[in-house]
Amino acid sequence: MSIGNSPEDERPFEDERVEEDREEARPSIGRALQQARIAAGLTVDDISSATRVRMNIVHAIEADDFTACGGDVYARGHIRTLAKAVHLDPAPLLAQYGDEHGGRPAPTPAAPLFEAERIRPERRGPNWTAAMVAAIVAVIGFVGFTMFQGGDDSGGEANVAEGSTPTTGGSASPTTKTKKPTDPTPEASDSAIAAAPQDKVTVQVAAVDGRSWIAAKDHNGRMIFDGVLKQGDTKTFQDSSKVHLVLGDAGAIDLFVNGKKIKDDFQPGSVERLTYTKGDPEAG
């Protein structure tokens, strides 16, 4: 009779080894964020500028050191913000963080300051009391002005209303009113770009299909613009010889270089690094 262990007794140890192999195959949170950032062609400086998370915190998180975040709540917020910036689903990373650091933290009343959108001040509602007071003052002023002008003859009022010029003989000849200029059409905007100085490079960036983070530098590498364009926003950059661009979501952008639209096949969510000169439009 054998006194050794049966195969059934050894199965739990095999299951534990498979589970351990699975854990080792899964990359750490910091490693996953770093690999996604590199695959997107972004530097730590790019991520810090886009998310407003300090560079030292980005470096620490990519090294799986979350002590610089200031607590679990802020660490989770930074993980979520960085994951979105490199086009990762934050849910698996947050679940992994909970498994490794004791589950989900208790809710805290403190406002999360790590979200990039929260950096902008929230808009306050209109002050209706001040608006009503201003309207009443305007009405009183208009009534007083009308009463003050009551002594003028009707002919003079008609001349002013019709835009005619009074003459010394008492008769007035009506003059033609000039129309206000209409809003410029898209074609007029394109013509204005085309009329840009030939000795400079002019680049216009328009967010037509959504918001996109944009960075622009001149030929010396100095930053001209670093921020987010909302859908419908347009920015124009000009330099004596060269304009360098980084488009955070190139699929949402239309480009015009020296008056001509760039024909591109940029994909939604793709990051593009472009350089344009006076001889373009062609990507450098």
Image (spheres, grey):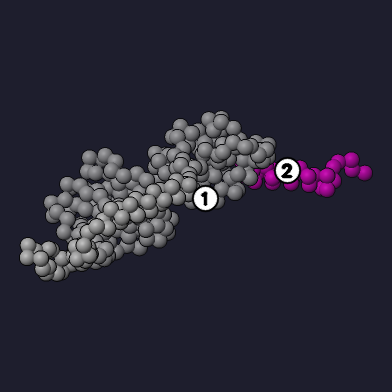
Left or right: 125 as drawn, with respect to 140: right
Which of 218/33 is in front?
Answer: 218
Q: Position of residue 189 (x, y in %)?
A: 24, 61
- Numbered range of the magenta stretch: 1-26
Q: Which residue is mark 1?
A: 88
Image coordinates for residue 100, horizontal then vertical, percent = 65, 38
Front-most of residues 237 and 274? 237
Q: Please, what is the dominant secondary structure of the magenta stretch?
A: helix
Name the residue: 26% across, 56% down: 149
Are circles 2 and 1 on residues that touch, CB within 8 Å? Answer: no
| Residue drawn at x 52%, y 50% as measured from the top left | 88
Residue for badge 2: 16
Front tag of 2 and 1: 1
> Among all residues in the image, which is located at the extreme left?
169
Identify the image quadrant of residue 99.
top right
Looking at the rendered structure, which numbered label has been put on residue 212?
Answer: none
In the rendered image, the quadrant that contains the N terminus is top right
